[in-house]
Image (cartoon, rainbow, N blue to C red):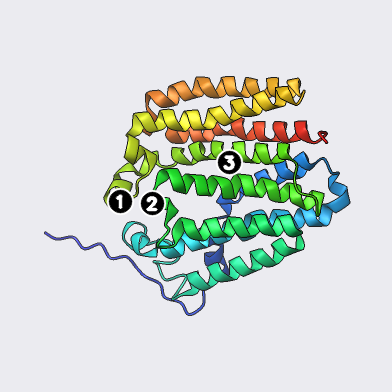
Amino acid sequence: MTVSHNVHVERRAVPRPADVLELAKPVTWFPPMWAYACGVVSSGVPVRERSGLVLLGVVLAGPLVCATSQVINDWFDRHVDAINEPHRPIPSGRIPGRWGLWLGLAGTLASLGVGALLGRWGLLATALGLLLAWGYSMPPFRFKQNGWVGNLAVGLSYEGLAWVTGAAVMLGSVAPRAEILFLALMYSLGAHGMLTLNDFKAIAGDTRMGVRSLPVQLGPGRAARVASATILLPQLAVIAALVAWQRPLAAAAIGGLCVVQVLMMRRFVAQPVARALWYSALGVPFSVLGMMVAAAAVRGLA
């Protein structure tokens, strides 16, 4: 007996706002918004002096740049999603025709327009983030096809460039200090490992589709160790830098957070496929908290 599974495809002339919001994935907006907030704090400039621009930057980091990157990704993944996840907004027809592409282009232009309001450095960081977003998903680049390159692109965009944008908004025409750029880079590299955690749940699918995530390339065990090291080592570099900058209390605080992470990493590495999402939910927040500790520590450096 043959069983037929029919997926209802809803075709609309114009997408509903609720479907556009689903396509933009608000749940993904927090990381760049948090990194942006860290950049604001690390600048050392009181928020009240530029409160309007600070709020504008929050909108830029999350509902504009990050949302646009999600739309772009779903547009270029629409054929794969039609097979694996036909209920998603584009393959289901709730985002009809080429609306996904038009929304991605509109989000890009809107992001650049808002970025221009934040000054030269804010616009530059916005433009680089958008380039990485398009390169991550669009052929022939498709950074996402390789776990090393794709996760680095997302880490730089979601963490580093968002951090730099936050600092740039507060500093105006002055380029962010070397200490700020260092922290932004370190936490971007750490984000590479965090992003790898999401790849363990899709090893079988990625293997079939030719996506060379780190768990596919290295196997779950080695990928778990690489992800853990990639999360931890940048934090150790931040600790060393804070000591050199005479910020011992902040260094000690992040060191304590690292101890907790190491204990959890040992449990994760023992069963990486089963515990990747567990570590992502419970272990990653300790690194995220350390970002703000580091940002607050450098705000007084000249």
Residue ID at (59%, 55%): 129
> Considering the image in quadrants, where does the N terminus appear?
bottom left
Residue at the disc numbered 2 = 145
Res. 180 image quadrant: top right
Q: Residue furthest right?
A: 49
Is residue 288 left or right of 100 when viewed as pictured? right
Q: Are marks 1 and 3 in contact (CB under 8 Å)?
A: no
Is residue 241 left or right of 222 when viewed as pictured? right
**Amino acid type assigned to the residue bearing label 3 in the image:** Ser
**Amino acid type assigned to the residue bearing label 2 in the image:** Gln
Q: Position of residue 122 (x, y in %)?
A: 71, 56
Residue ID at (55%, 28%): 233
> Considering the image in quadrants, where does the C terminus appear?
top right
Q: Of helix, strand and loop, which one carries label 3?
A: helix
Residue at the disc numbered 1 = 210
Label disc, if present, on residue 174 of the rendered structure: none
Q: Of helix, strand and loop, which one carries label 2?
A: helix
**Real-space Cα distance between discs 1 and 3?**
26 Å
